[in-house]
Image: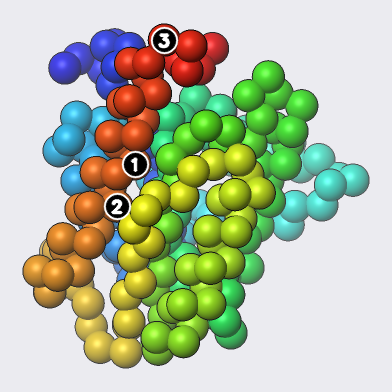
């Protein structure tokens, strides 16, 4: 389907750290490639972009080009996929910060991520951090009025997870990332095709 087709969903992905090619960045990239295979348009905000953003302070509106670029994509998107490392039992500061920037949309007709699917991916060096971070990410998705997908992916990064070309070493992990992408895309397609639910 052409990109101008109104039923082609636009999916935004967030993931990564200041380290280029981090595990979380690779994980969200795999999911976005699957979303594209399913017919979606995608946009990745990677670790380099996320780490460059100013600290969000409600009383200080940082009108930078990067912030405006992200907010424009967030307002236009039909779904989100977020991959975060688990740091000390929760999200990384940089991922939390970019999600906090969505507060700038609170006065929009369609605020935050209202009505959009939200795929959750967590990478951490241990299952405990994976679990607590996934709960935190799902909670944030609810606060942003999004719909967390039924599947939340947790990847234990104690051992290498990806090949040098960015593909998954384990077929199970590949299948999980593909499934969360499919759930986001299918939810978005359903809303776009349902009268009365199509965003303005």
How crowded is the residue under tag 2: few (<14 C-alpha within 10 Å), some, or many (20+)?
many
Q: CA distance from mark 2 to mark 1?
A: 6 Å
- 56 vs 69, left or right, is right
Closer to the camera, 117 or 47? 117
Q: Which numbered mark, 2 or 3, is in the foreground of this view?
A: 3
Describe the element under mark 2 as helix, strand or loop: helix
| Residue indicated by mark 3 | 195
Q: Quadrant of the C terminus?
A: top right
Closer to the camera, 165 or 112? 112
Q: Which numbered mark, 3 or 1, is in the foreground of this view?
A: 3
Write the residue at 32% across / 75% down. 155
Residue 19 visible in the snapshot = no
Figure check: 123 above or below 187: below
Write the residue at 66% across / 49% down. 143
Describe the element under mark 3 as helix, strand or loop: loop
| Residue indicated by mark 1 | 184
Q: Residue furthest right?
A: 59
Describe the element under mark 1 as helix, strand or loop: helix
- 66 vs 188, left or right, is right
Closer to the camera, 81 or 94? 81
Q: Quadrant of the N terminus?
A: top left
| Residue indicated by mark 2 | 180
**Pointers 2 and 1 in contact (CB under 8 A)?**
yes
Residue 129 visible in the snapshot = yes
Figure check: 191 above or below 98: above
Q: CA distance from mark 2 to mark 3?
A: 25 Å
């Amino acid at each position: 389907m052409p990109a101008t087709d109104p039923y082609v969903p636009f999916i935004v992905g967030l993931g990564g750290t200041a380290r280029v090619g981090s595990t979380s960045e690779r994980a969200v990239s795999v999911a976005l490639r699957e979303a594209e295979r399913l017919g979606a348009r995608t946009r990745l905000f990677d670790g380099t972009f996320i780490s460059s953003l100013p600290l969000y302070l409600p009383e200080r509106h940082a009108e930078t080009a990067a912030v405006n670029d992200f907010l424009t994509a967030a307002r236009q998107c039909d779904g989100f996929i977020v991959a975060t490392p688990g740091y000390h039992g929760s999200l990384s500061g940089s991922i939390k910060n970019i999600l906090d920037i969505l507060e700038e949309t609170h006065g929009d007709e369609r605020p935050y991520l209202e009505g959009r699917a939200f795929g959750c991916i967590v990478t951490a060096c241990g299952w405990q951090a994976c679990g607590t971070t996934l709960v935190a990410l799902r909670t944030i998705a609810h606060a942003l009025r999004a719909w967390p997908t039924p599947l939340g992916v947790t990847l234990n990064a104690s051992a290498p997870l990806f090949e040098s070309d960015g593909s998954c070493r384990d077929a199970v992990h590949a299948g999980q990332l593909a499934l969360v992408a499919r759930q986001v895309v299918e939810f978005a397609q359903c809303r776009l095709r349902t009268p009365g639910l199509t965003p303005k």
